[in-house]
Image (tube, rainbow, N blue to C red):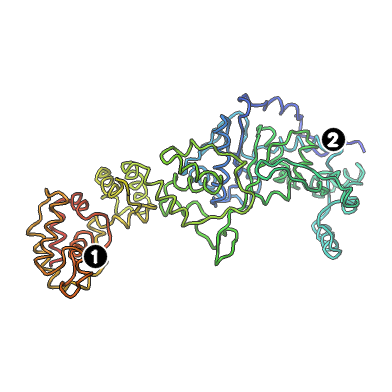
C-alpha cells in the first residue's frame, strides 16, 4: 500500500504539514515549573458544579505557578450545541472569580494559540489525520451502520469486548488503494480510524501495559489500547479523543484536569500521543462529586439535585468566596487545618497541590457548605456584603431594591449586627436567607411571625408596650434601656431575673425575658433576633415608636 498516495487521495485539500503548525505554535515562553491548564467544556447550556470544581483546580495550578489558564470550547457536536451557552460558561465562572488568561471570550477570542473553538480547527485536525494515514497509522473505514450493528451483536453474543479491533478490523484494514478509490467515487461515506498496534489476543501476561503518572492517583498501569477508534467522523469532524490530543499539544498544555470517568479512555489517548509523536501532558483525574442520600453515597444528579447547577448558587445567593472555600475543603485534605492556623489570611495564600487531592469520591455536603459560608461571610466587611446583597436583590428580588440601592451604609449597619466581639453571631449564610433574616427592617416585608409568650396575657402585653413607650428614650445606652424594662417587669408582677422565676414560679406571672420578648415582637416581629437595643438604634426612634404603637393597636 502506498500510504502517501492514500493520504493525498483522502485529503487533497490539505496542503500544510504538522511542522507548519509546530512552528506556528511554539513552546510557550514561561518560567520553569509554570503550568498551562485549560477548561474544555461543550456548549450544552448547562454548567454545573463539576465544571467549577475542575476549573478551580485548573486556575489554582496555573496561577500559583505563574502559568496560563485558557478556555477552549469543544463544540464539534452540532446536535448538543445550545445558543448562548458560551456566554453562560464564561459569565457563570466569572461570577465565581474564575477568569481565563486566554481563549474564548464573549466577543471572540484572545491569545496566540487559537482558534480556541474546536469547530474552527478542522484543517488542523485533518492535517494530523493525513499525517497518520501517510505513515500507515490510520485508515479509511467504510463499514455501514448495519455492518457495525451486526459486528456488535456477534461480539455481545460471544461475550467479547465490543468495538473494531483484531479480526473485526481486518476487512477495513486490508482494503487496497483501488478499492478505497472505487468506494470514494461511488460516494460511500467513511470514517478515519486509528490503526492500533495493541493486541489483546495474547496471553494476559504478554499483553503490553501502559504506565501513566497521574498527579492525583500516582502511577497508573493498564492494558494498552487495541481498538481502532474513530479519529475523524464521516463529516470530517474529529472525535474528542483525537481533537484533545492535538489541541493540548499545540496549545502547549502541561496539565489536564478531568474527571475519573476518562480513566477508561487513557490507553487510547496514550496511543494517540505516541503515534502523533507528542509529549503527553500530566493528567490529573479528579474524584467524582458524590452526596449522601439516605445513608448511601451516589453521584450528584442533574435531575435530582438542584445544587449540581451553578445557577442554584447564584439564585440562592451564596457568596462566590464561600463556594470556592468550601470546594477547597473537598479538594485539599489539609485546607481546613490551614484555615484554622490562618483564620484571616486570603484563601489565595493557601498552597494548593494535587498531591493532597483524594482519588476516592469527593463528598458534597450542603450543610458543610453553609457552615463554611457562615465563617467566610464573617470575614467579609459589612460594606462589601451590602454591595453583594444589593446586586442579588437587583436580580432576584427587584421589588425590594428601593431598600438597598443608595442605602448601602444603612444595610451595612444591619448586616454588622452582632458580628463583633469575642463571640460574634454567625447568622448570615446566603443572600436569600440573609434577606429573610433582616426583612423586618423593611416595612413592606415586616410581619409578626411569633406568638406572645403564654405567660403574658393580651391585656398585660398591651400595658407592657404602653409603659415601654412612656419610658422610651432613644439616647439611653444599653444598660439604661434594659433597666427600664426590668422596672416595667417588676412593677407588673414579673421576676426581674429568669432564675428567680424558675425557683419560685408561683410568686410571679413570668420573668423579664418574657416581657422583653413582647417588645422584641413589636419591633422585629419575631421572638429570636439580634440584640433588640441595637436594632432600635438602627431603626431610629420614629420607626421604633411606630412599630410599638402598631402592636398596641
Is 99 situated above or below 200? Answer: above
Q: Position of residue 439 (x, y in %)?
A: 28, 56
Structural crowding at the residue carrying mark 2, measured as other residues with C-alpha within 10 Å and reported as few (<14), some (14–19) or many (≥20): some
Query: In the image, 352: left or right of 229?
Result: left
Between circles 2 and 1, the one closer to the viewer is: 1
Spatial CA distance of label 2 from label 1 is 80 Å
Query: Which residue reaches farthest left?
Result: 470
The quarter holding residue 237 reads top right
Q: How many marks?
A: 2
Residue denoted by label 1: 448
Q: Eyeballing the image, is 243 above or below 453? A: above
Sequence-wise first label, 2 or 1:
2
The image position of residue 233, as x and y in percent, is 75, 47
Query: Quick one: SS at disc 2?
Result: helix
Give the crowd class for mark 1: few <14, some 14-19, many >=20 residues within 10 Å.
some
- Of residues 5 and 194, the one drawn nearer to the viewer in this rendering: 194
Tag 1 secondary structure? loop
Percent of width and height locating residue 200: 87, 51
Which residue is nearer to you in this view: 164 or 259? 259
Quarter of the figure with the N terminus:
top right
Quadrant that contains the C terminus: bottom left
| Up-down relation of residue 268 to residue 308 (above or below) | above
Q: At x 12% / y 70%, what residue is drawn?
A: 493
Return the residue at label 2: 134
Say whether residue 524 is left or right of residue 428. left
Q: Find residue 158 and report its horizontal and vertical position in percent.
A: 86, 64
Is there CB contact under 8 Å for labels 2 and 1? no
Amino acid at each position: 500500500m502506498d500510504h502517501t498516495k492514500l493520504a493525498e487521495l483522502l485529503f487533497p485539500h490539505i496542503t500544510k504539514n504538522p511542522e507548519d503548525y509546530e512552528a506556528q505554535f511554539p513552546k510557550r515562553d514561561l518560567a520553569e515549573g509554570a503550568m498551562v491548564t485549560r477548561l474544555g467544556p461543550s456548549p450544552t447550556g448547562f454548567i454545573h458544579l463539576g465544571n467549577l470544581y475542575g476549573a478551580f483546580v485548573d486556575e489554582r495550578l496555573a496561577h500559583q505557578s505563574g502559568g496560563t489558564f485558557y478556555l477552549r470550547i469543544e463544540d464539534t457536536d452540532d446536535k448538543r450545541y445550545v445558543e448562548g451557552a458560551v456566554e453562560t460558561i464564561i459569565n457563570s465562572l466569572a461570577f465565581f472569580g474564575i477568569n481565563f488568561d486566554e481563549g474564548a471570550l464573549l466577543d471572540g477570542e484572545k491569545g496566540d494559540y487559537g482558534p480556541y473553538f474546536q469547530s474552527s480547527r478542522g484543517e488542523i485536525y485533518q492535517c494530523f489525520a493525513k499525517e497518520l494515514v501517510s505513515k500507515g497509522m490510520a485508515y479509511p473505514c467504510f463499514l455501514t451502520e448495519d455492518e457495525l450493528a451486526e459486528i456488535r451483536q456477534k461480539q455481545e453474543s460471544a461475550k467479547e469486548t465490543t468495538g473494531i479491533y483484531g479480526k473485526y478490523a481486518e476487512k477495513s484494514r486490508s482494503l487496497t488503494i483501488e478499492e478505497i478509490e472505487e468506494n470514494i467515487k461511488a460516494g460511500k461515506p467513511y470514517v478515519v480510524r486509528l490503526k492500533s498496534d495493541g493486541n489483546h489476543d495474547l496471553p494476559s501476561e504478554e499483553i503490553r501495559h501502559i504506565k501513566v503518572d497521574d498527579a492525583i492517583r500516582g502511577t497508573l498501569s493498564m492494558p494498552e489500547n487495541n481498538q481502532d477508534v474513530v479519529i475523524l467522523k464521516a463529516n470530517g469532524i474529529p472525535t474528542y479523543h483525537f481533537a484533545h490530543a492535538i489541541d493540548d499539544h499545540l496549545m502547549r498544555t502541561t496539565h489536564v484536569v478531568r474527571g475519573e470517568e476518562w480513566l477508561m479512555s487513557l490507553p487510547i489517548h496514550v496511543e494517540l500521543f505516541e503515534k502523533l509523536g507528542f509529549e503527553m501532558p500530566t493528567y490529573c483525574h479528579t474524584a467524582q462529586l458524590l452526596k449522601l442520600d439516605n445513608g448511601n453515597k451516589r453521584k450528584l444528579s442533574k435531575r435530582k439535585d438542584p445544587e449540581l447547577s451553578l445557577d442554584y448558587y447564584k439564585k440562592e445567593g451564596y457568596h462566590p468566596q464561600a463556594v470556592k472555600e468550601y470546594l477547597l475543603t473537598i479538594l485539599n485534605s489539609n485546607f481546613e487545618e490551614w484555615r484554622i492556623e490562618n483564620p484571616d489570611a486570603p484563601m489565595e495564600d493557601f498552597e494548593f497541590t494535587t498531591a493532597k487531592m483524594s482519588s476516592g469520591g469527593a463528598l458534597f455536603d450542603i450543610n458543610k457548605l453553609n457552615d463554611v459560608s457562615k465563617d467566610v461571610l464573617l470575614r467579609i466587611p459589612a460594606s462589601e456584603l451590602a454591595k453583594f446583597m444589593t446586586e442579588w436583590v437587583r436580580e432576584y428580588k427587584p421589588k425590594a431594591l428601593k431598600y438597598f440601592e443608595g442605602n448601602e451604609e444603612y444595610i451595612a449597619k444591619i448586616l454588622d449586627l452582632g458580628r463583633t466581639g469575642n463571640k460574634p453571631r454567625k447568622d448570615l449564610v446566603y443572600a436569600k436567607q440573609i434577606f429573610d433574616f433582616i426583612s423586618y427592617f423593611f416595612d413592606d416585608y415586616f410581619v409578626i411571625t411569633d406568638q406572645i409568650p403564654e405567660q403574658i396575657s393580651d391585656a398585660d402585653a398591651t400595658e407592657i408596650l404602653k409603659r415601654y413607650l412612656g419610658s422610651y428614650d432613644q439616647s439611653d445606652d444599653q444598660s439604661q434601656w434594659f433597666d427600664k424594662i426590668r422596672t416595667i417587669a417588676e412593677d407588673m408582677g414579673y421576676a426581674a431575673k429568669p432564675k428567680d422565676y424558675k425557683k419560685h414560679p408561683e410568686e410571679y406571672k413570668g420573668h423579664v425575658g418574657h416581657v422583653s420578648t413582647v417588645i422584641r415582637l413589636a419591633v422585629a416581629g419575631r421572638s429570636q433576633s439580634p440584640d433588640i437595643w441595637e436594632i432600635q438604634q438602627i431603626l431610629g426612634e420614629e420607626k421604633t415608636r411606630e412599630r410599638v404603637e402598631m402592636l398596641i393597636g
